[in-house]
Each structure stands twice: as C-alpha cells, then as structure tokens.
Amino acid sequence: MHTRITHTLGAVAAAGALTTLGLAGTSMPSAAASTTPAARPAHPVTAYVANFSSGTVTPISTAINKAGKPITVGGNPAAIAITPNGKTAYVANEGSGTVTPISTATSKAGKAIKTGTTPVAIAITPDGKTAYVVSEFSNTVIPIRTATNTALKAITVGGGPTAIAITPNGKTAYVASNSGTVTPVSTATNKAGKLIKYGNGSEAGKAYIVITPNGKTAYVTESGPYTPGDTVTPISTASNKAGKAITVGQWPVAIAITPNGKTAYVASTGSGPTGCIQAACSGQAPAAGSGTATVTPIITSTNKPGRPIKIAGGAGDIAITPNGTTAYIVSSPYVIPVRTAANTALKAVTVGPEPIVIAITPDGKTAYVALDNSTSRGDFPGQVIPISTVTNKAGKGITVGIDPAAIAITP
C-alpha cells in the first residue's frame, strides 16, 4: 500500500499551474457566492486517475461515472497534470524516471519523455506551452515543451524537491523542497533564483506549496517523517522574501486556497507516520495516528490563522469547489465537507478505507475521491467514489488500478 498525497493533485493547489482542476488563472466568485454549481461544460469532462502500482492511468467519464480502458504509462505514476486546453494529460512516472503524454481525445499514450530520477510532481504554465517536472532525487526541475514533447535542460533546485506551483501570470515557478528551501525559477529563462529558506527541513518528508490567485503570495509547508512541522510560511512573490511563519496543526499534509484568494486551508494529521522507515517514507504523507486531526483556516490578507477545525479520522488531501463555498477534506474513512463562510465541518461522508486524493469537476457538481484498497494481505484494485456536492451523498464506486495516487480532471 502506498499512501501518497500528490498535490498536483486534488485541490486548487497550484494556482496558476493548471493542474488537476484546470482552474488557475481564471476569475472565480467569492466564497459567499451561491452554492449552485456552475454550468457543465458543453464538451465531455474526463477524470484521469494515476494508478501507482499498476503503471496505468484510468480515464473516467464524469457524465456516466464509467471507467474506460486503462492506459499503460511508465512505472509508478505518481502525479498528473492537464494542459489548459484540455488536450493532453502529462503523467509523472516516479519509478521509471519518465513523463508520459496522453491525448485526451484518443486516450492514447505518447512516447515517454525522460526526466530526472523520481519525478513526483508536475505543473503546467497557464499558456500551456511548458510542463515543469519535479525530480526529487535528482534535485532538479525539467521543463518540457508541450508542442514537441521534448525535455529541455534540467534546472538545479534545493535538495529534495517535492512540490511546485506556478504564478497565475506564468512568469515564475516556485519549487518547494523538503530541505527547507523554495527555489524560484524564471519561466522565461529557465534559470533558478536565490533559494528562499523556510521551516526547519522535514528529513525526507514532503513539502507542499500553493500560490494565491492574485499571484502575490506563495504558502509553503512541510511534514516529517521525523520532524512534525506545525507552520506555514508565506513568501512574497514580488520580493521572494519569506514572512513570519504561521502556526497550524502538527504534521500538515495538504494546503489549498479558496478561488477568491481570501483563505488558505491547511490540513494536519496531528501525528506522525507509523511503521515507516526513512527510505520508504520519502515522498509519502504521514499516516494519521493518535493525534488530533485539524484543518486550519488562514486569512491571506493578514496571514493570521483562525480557529482550527477538528476533523474525524485523519486529515489528508483538500479540494475546494469552484464557487468557493465548500472545502472537502479527505479523512479516512470519510470525506469531510467544510463550509468556508462559517468554517464549520458538516456531516462526514463515508467513502471507505484509505481515501487518498480528491478532485472536483469544473462545474462543481461532483467530487471524486480515490481509495487505496491494498492491505497487508495483498494489492487490490482501488476505487474512485463520486460525491454529489449538492447532497453530499456518495455514489457507487468505480474500479480503477492498484494504489491510485493522483486525479486530474479536464477543464
């Protein structure tokens, strides 16, 4: 079983990077807007699920909640991002050191693109011209020209990079490393700037980063396995200076920002991983244990944390609806809806054991949650559970591959 939180993933995590939800760089209504979901796009919308241990990606038609034929990619696909025009999904294959492009029109995989060792995150510029791939054990970011699917020269960044976010104007990619640094990269020159220090370094754990929709502030955090971490650091993108650290719950494992940019939500497990050695834990999210899981709202205008929201189970990935009214937090065996207007948790939605990642359709009507059904008894196919955001009711599970690790939905 591979419990992985890949933040290209589930929430509006990399504002401007056009990752899982295809929302970055667009104008969003405020969190106080109507709870009525936006109109569904006229074109078909597909959710793509990366199956870590199967070496496949499963396409799911969101119109009928039916899985298509699995698409073979590289070894251990761990992250996925889709171009803003929705034509190509890029899959980072952690085990084979490659990225596989998939045509969304045909669901056919193209030729694998070689990257550095252990690609774990991917983000695409708002203009769709370049995909940036984070290679954790190479300490590099590799730009890929999407027009030709060719990799450019690797860019050296801080040690142990695990997350990336791109500003909405597309000018700078920020790469967060578990060594306690963030590297700004100019997308015009593909040159790395001066390292920005934050936190204390998480000893082969995982870093997380998001950028506000106005592009002014990046928020970065980190988690274990040996250093718990309990802060989020704001970074001014104008000066590339880190501000005062903001205290949140221990072992933060996910962060997302509302579409109006007013609030950042940080999910913390409250306790560290269990039975996990350093080599095995690298890049994985700490498992929930005996501590109190929380979600901490941060007001971005003041960088002040609000009262932590206690979460049943163990907090994990976060996704926020396009209208900003509800944040959905993965918390085994539940998904917890949180009303952003009042910062109150609603009744938990039971989805099943080991929910890993979550993503929401562009019209805001459905959240898709991936479950890892593998246990100590063996590896078993995972499931994706659709949740109606209108009723907060879970639908019938959709079978996918083994160890689903990331979800991306076409714009």
Image: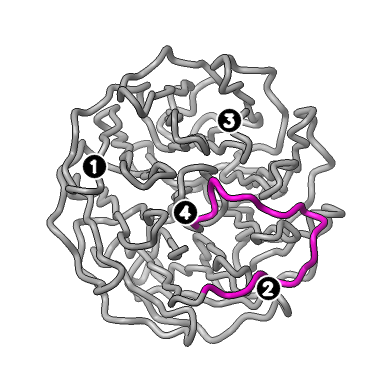
Mark number, residue 218: 3
Q: Nearer the viewer, residue 145 or 221?
A: 145
**How far across and down, in percent of the image, does residue 59 sit?**
35, 74
Element at badge 2?
loop
Q: Which residues are magenta?
A: 22-41
Spatial CA span between label 4 and label 3:
17 Å
Residue sticking out furthest to the right:
342
Mark 1 / mark 3, whichever is N-terminal = 1
Query: Which one is earlier in the sequence, the residue at label 4 or at label 1?
Result: 4
Mark 2 crowdedness (10 Å alpha carbons): few <14, some 14-19, many ≥20: many
Asked whether 129 or 178 is in front, the reply is: 129
Q: Are marks 1 and 3 in contact (CB under 8 Å)?
A: no
Q: The residue tagged with tag 1: helix, strand or loop?
A: strand
Q: Residues within 10 Å of mark 4 (few under 14, many from 20)?
A: many
Mark-to-mark CA distance, 2 and 4? 19 Å
Asked if marks 4 and 3 touch (Cβ < 8 Å), the reply is: no
Residue located beneath label 4 in the image: 9
Q: Amino acid at mark 4?
A: Leu
